[in-house]
Amino acid sequence: MLSDAGSNPATSTRLQRPRKGVLHAISSVARTAGRALSTNSVPRATREERYVTSLAPAVMVALIGGLAISLQSLFSGTIGHRVGVAESTFIVHVGGVLLAGLIMLGLRGGNLSQWRAVPWYTLTAGLLGVAIVASVSFSVPRLGLASTLTLAILAQLLLGALLDHFGLLGAVPRPLDLWRITGLTAVALGTWLVVR
């Protein structure tokens, strides 16, 4: 009987069909599970990698900007101490105008023609720049670089938190919460420790 069933092609086909059906079902389930796992895990990792990749240049630029602020504060303070605060402010901004002018020439004006589209109060940024350089030139020789920068950072954080909280002057509203208040308090305490 066994030899007849094995030698009969029709019987062999009938015996193999259920086996193939089971294998097909198992492979189908495995493929579905694999697609589900890949859909759930790979894009998430990709999003995290993209976030870190896009964040890294911004962090580096911010750090470079912080170093530039420290050096500019030191240099403008030295000029202010030897020449005068007004003279230091003038020298610093003349150098800034020259560099910015060269950059604009290289960009062939860039989007400078769109300046009318910005809110009017943002055009006072240059005037505020004069106030910043003048205050730093005055304070660094008297308080030291670290104390001046620490006080400036505290003032920036406090004003920035208020602007965020009320959404003023185009700031994206971000209400103060317990964590932000705790952070600002810690910065204020650190400022006192540095300046005292």
Image: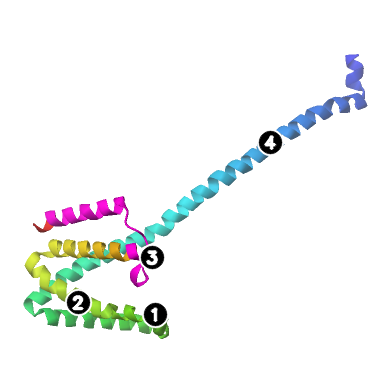
Q: CA distance from mark 2 to mark 3?
A: 25 Å
Q: Secondary structure at mark 4?
A: helix
- Residue ID for mark 3: 172
Q: Is residue 25 above or below residue 125?
A: above
Which residue in the structure is indicated by mark 4?
Answer: 29
Relative image position of residue 46 (x, y in whole percent): 50, 51
CA gap, disc 1 and disc 4: 58 Å
Position of the C terminus by quadrant: bottom left
The amino acid beneath tag 2 is: Ala
Q: Characterize the local packing of mark 1: few (<14), some (14-19) or many (20 or more) Cα atoms within 10 angstroms.
A: few
Q: Position of residue 111 (x, y in %)?
A: 42, 81
Q: Which residues are the magenta region? A: 165-193
Label 1 SS: loop
Secondary-structure class at tag 3: loop
Q: Residue at x 15, y 69 (%)?
A: 74
Name the residue carrying label 1: 118
> Reading the chain from its start, which is encountered first: label 2 or label 4?
4
Q: Earlier in the sequence, mark 3 or mark 1?
A: 1
Front position in the image: 169 or 93: 169
Characterize the local packing of mark 4: few (<14), some (14-19) or many (20 or more) Cα atoms within 10 angstroms.
few
Residue 145 visible (yes or no): yes
Q: CA distance from mark 3 to mark 1?
A: 16 Å
Instruction: Please tell me whether mark 4 or mark 3 is closer to you in this view.
Output: 3
Residue denoted by label 2: 131
Instruction: Provide the secondary structure element on which disc 2 rests.
Output: helix
For badge 1, the amino acid type reads: Val
Instruction: Please name the residue shown 27% across and 54% down the image.
Output: 181
Q: Position of residue 93 (x, y in %)?
A: 22, 81
